[in-house]
Image (tube, coloured by chain):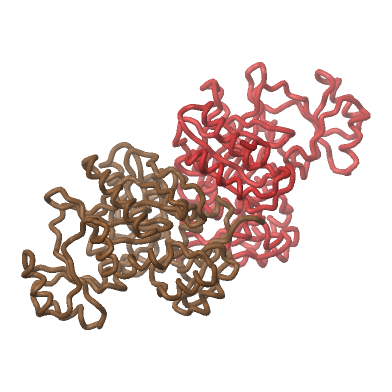
Chain colours: A brown, B red
C-alpha cells in the first residue's frame, strides 16, 4: 500500500464530511476524537479516543500519519510546533493557524499586508473601550475575546462602559471593533496547497440568524463582478501571505458604501462551503484533503446556476429521521447531510443543499426541508 | 437516536461506496466482512469480521440491524429465509435474490413474465449441448454454470461437443444459451422500494473487455428513444414481478435486428451504475440505501449531458497513488474512486468518472485517466 494516511484532529461534522470526501481517493483516514460518539467517530474505521490538548496523546496519534490536519482550531500552537519538530507535516501549520486562533494576531497581520478590516484595536478595560468608541463614530462597539469564540460566542455588542465590563471578566485580551454598517455578509473560500497552487470558490452570501450561519447562497446574488473578483483576490492573498495550507474561509462584510471588509478567518472546511458538496465540481472537503496531501487541486466551479445550503438546527422535535419521509417525497432532488449528533435546541445537527436554475425555488426548497427537519414547518 | 442501522453483508467496493453514500443520511452502517483488510472494512466504523456462509455469524451480525442488505449475491438462500423467520427485514429478500443467484431460476421466471431472453435451456451433458445447438442456428453455444459466475467466470463459448465437456466438470447444473448477435451491451438500472415506488436511471452502454466491464457511457449514445423506454419498462417490470427491493441492474444485449434481450440480473449496486455517483442527482448507492429503508427514492436523472465511467484495473504498476499527480493536474474535473485494494493484474481496484457536454472529450479524459492509473498510458 502506497496510499498515505491523513490524520485529522477533532471528531466533529467537518471531520465526518472530510472522511466521506476522502474515501473515493483511497487515502487512509485516522481520527483523533474526544469520544466514540462524536460525529466523525461514528463513521471512521481508525479512531483514537483522546484529548487533543495533551501533547503525548497528539504524538502517539501522529505516529503513522503522513500528515496532520484539523476539524477545529483549538490545538495549542506549541503542540503543533512540537509535532513539526518531530517531523510530522502539520497542515495548516502553526504559523498560519495562529491567525485563525487569535483575532489580535489576525488583525495585526491583515493590517500589515493591507487587507481592509473594520477599525479595531486591543482594549485594556471598559474605559479604554469608551476611548475606542470616541476615536470613531461612538457606540455601539463590538468586543471579542481574541481566542475561543465561535458562532456568536465570545462576541458582545456594547453600548456603554457598563456593558463593556463583561468581556473582560474572562481575563483574556479583548479586541474592540467598530460595528460595521453592512448590507450583507459574504464568504470567500479558497484552498491552497504546499506547493502554492490555489483555487477560489465563487463568493457566497451567508445569512446569519442569532449569530449562527443559517443560509448560504452560491454564488452571492447580485454581487458586482469586480467586487466578487476583489473578494476572491483578497482571500487568495491572505492564504498566500499567511502561508495557509488547506481550506481557508474568509468571512466578509459588504458595507453599505460598497466596500469589502474581513470579519473572520477559518483555516479548515467551513459552513459557508458546505454547498460545494453538491454544488461544485470538487467539494471543499475533497480539496482540503488534496491540499494537505499536496495533490493537484480539483475544480472549484459550480455545477448549477444556484446552490443553496440551509443549516438544520436542533429544535424541540428529536426525531428527525421520521421527517425524511415527507422531505424526500416532496423533493427527490433534495440533498440531506446529517451529522449523527443528538438533537439539542439550536445545535447544528445537519444541513440541506438544493440546486437549480431558479433561485427563488431553490431557496424555498432548502428552507422548507430544513424547517421541516427542525420541526418549525409542519406541512 | 432514532436513526436506523443498515447491515451490509460483504466488504467489497460496493459496500464501501454504499457506506460513503449513506453517511450524509445519518444512518448507521454495520458491515459483515471476511477480513479487516476488505475494501469497505477499511472505512466503516462498525465492522464484524466473519463468514457470511455461517448462519450463526449472520444471526449474530443481524442483531441490532434494522435491515440487512448485500454487497454480493452469495449468501445461501436458506440463511436468508432463516433471518427473515427471525424477524429481520432482508432486502432484497430471498425470493427475489434467488433470481440473481441462479441463472436457471432467472431464465424460467423471465420466460414466465414474458421478458425477452436469448434462446436457452438447462442442458444435461455435452450431447445435450449438441442437441441444443441443432435446435437453433448451431454452434457456437454459450454455456454457464447456473450459480457462482461473475465477470466472465463460469461462462464458456463452445464450438463443439468436445469443448462442451469442461462446464459440466463442476457437477452443477449448466445453462445453454444461443450466442446473441449483438451490436452492443446496454444496462437498465432501476431501484425499487418495499412500498412499490421505483425509479429508472437512463439506459447506459456498457463495453466489456475480456468479459469484464471496461467503459460505461450514460446515457447510451444513439439509442432509439422507444428502445430506451422499452428497456426501462422491462427493468421496472422485472423489479416488480420478482419483488426486488433495492438496486436492480439488468444487463442487456441490443441485437443487430433491433431487439433488446436480457443477459444477466444483479440485485445490488452494480458496475454499470457507478457513473451515477458523479453523473446523477441521486447515486445508485444512495438510492439503494433509501430503498432498503423504505424511504422515498431520490431523483435518478443525469446532471450532465454525458457521463463516462472507466474501470481501473490492476496492471504491472503497483503504485497508483503516484499517478494521482499527473491525472489530477491534467484534469481538475476528474472524479477518482479507488477501493483501497491491493493491485493485482486484472483486478478491479477503482474507477474514474468524467462528465461534460462533448462525449468524445469526456470519453478521452476517462480513458486517459484509467489508463494512466493502470500504467498502460505513460504520458
The foreground one among A7 and B190 is A7
User: Residue sitting at 25 percent across and 73 percent down?
Assistant: A154
Count the labels in the image. 0
Asked which quadrant contains residue B373, the reply is: top right
Asked which quadrant contains residue A86, the reply is: bottom right
Residue B241 visible here:
no
Determine whether, in the image, residue B66 is placed left or right of residue A256.
right
Determine whether, in the image, residue A136 is placed left or right of residue B364.
left
Residue B368 visible here:
yes
Residue B264 at x, y percent in the picture: 69, 36
The foreground one among B255 and A50 is A50
Using the image, determine if residue A140 lies above or below residue A296: below
User: Residue sitting at 57 percent across and 56 percent down?
Assistant: A27
Quadrant of the image containing the C terminus of chain B: top right
Residue A363 at x, y percent in the picture: 28, 46
User: Residue sitting at 60 percent across and 45 percent down?
Assistant: B323
Using the image, determine if residue B369 lies above or below residue A103: above
Residue B114 at x, y percent in the picture: 65, 29
Q: Residue furthest top?
A: B257
Residue A266 at x, y percent in the picture: 34, 61
The foreground one among B275 and B369 is B369
Asked which quadrant contains residue B257, the reply is: top right
Determine whether, in the image, residue B66 is placed left or right of residue A341.
right
Quadrant of the image containing the N terminus of chain B: bottom left
Using the image, determine if residue A207 lies above or below residue B103: below
The foreground one among A212 and B28 is A212
Amino acid at each position: 500500500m502506497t496510499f498515505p494516511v491523513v490524520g485529522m484532529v477533532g471528531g466533529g461534522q467537518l471531520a465526518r464530511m472530510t472522511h466521506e470526501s476522502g474515501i473515493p481517493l483511497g487515502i487512509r483516514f485516522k481520527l483523533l476524537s474526544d469520544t466514540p460518539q462524536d460525529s466523525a467517530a461514528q463513521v471512521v474505521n481508525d479512531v483514537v479516543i483522546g484529548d487533543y490538548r495533551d501533547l503525548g496523546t497528539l504524538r502517539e496519534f501522529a505516529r503513522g500519519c503522513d500528515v496532520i490536519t484539523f476539524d477545529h482550531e483549538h490545538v495549542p500552537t506549541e503542540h503543533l510546533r512540537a509535532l513539526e519538530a518531530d517531523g510530522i507535516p502539520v497542515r495548516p501549520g502553526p504559523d498560519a493557524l495562529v491567525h485563525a486562533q487569535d483575532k489580535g494576531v489576525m488583525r495585526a497581520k491583515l493590517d500589515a499586508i493591507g487587507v481592509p478590516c473594520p477599525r479595531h484595536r486591543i482594549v485594556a478595560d471598559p474605559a479604554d473601550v469608551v476611548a475606542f468608541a470616541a476615536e470613531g463614530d461612538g457606540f455601539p462597539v463590538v468586543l471579542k475575546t481574541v481566542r475561543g469564540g465561535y458562532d456568536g460566542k465570545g462576541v458582545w455588542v456594547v453600548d456603554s462602559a457598563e456593558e463593556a465590563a463583561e468581556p473582560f471578566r474572562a481575563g483574556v485580551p479583548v479586541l474592540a471593533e467598530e460595528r460595521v454598517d453592512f448590507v450583507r455578509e459574504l464568504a470567500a473560500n479558497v484552498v491552497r496547497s504546499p506547493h502554492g497552487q490555489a483555487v477560489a470558490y465563487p463568493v457566497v452570501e451567508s445569512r446569519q440568524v442569532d449569530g449562527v450561519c443559517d443560509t448560504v447562497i452560491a454564488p452571492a446574488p447580485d454581487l458586482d463582478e469586480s467586487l466578487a473578483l476583489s473578494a476572491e483576490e483578497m482571500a487568495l492573498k491572505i492564504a498566500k501571505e499567511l502561508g495557509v495550507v488547506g481550506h481557508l474561509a474568509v468571512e466578509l462584510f459588504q458595507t453599505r458604501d460598497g466596500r469589502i471588509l474581513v470579519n473572520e478567518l477559518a483555516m479548515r472546511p467551513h459552513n459557508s462551503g458546505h454547498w460545494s458538496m453538491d454544488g461544485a465540481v470538487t467539494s471543499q472537503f475533497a480539496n482540503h484533503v488534496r491540499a494537505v496531501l499536496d495533490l493537484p487541486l480539483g475544480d472549484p466551479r459550480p455545477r448549477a446556476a444556484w446552490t443553496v445550503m440551509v443549516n438544520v438546527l436542533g429544535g424541540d422535535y428529536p426525531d428527525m429521521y421520521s421527517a425524511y419521509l415527507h422531505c424526500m417525497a416532496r423533493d427527490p432532488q433534495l440533498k440531506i447531510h446529517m451529522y449523527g449528533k443528538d438533537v439539542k435546541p439550536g445545535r447544528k445537527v445537519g444541513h440541506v443543499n438544493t440546486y437549480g436554475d431558479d433561485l427563488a425555488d431553490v431557496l424555498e426548497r432548502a428552507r422548507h426541508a430544513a424547517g421541516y427537519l427542525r420541526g418549525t414547518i409542519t406541512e
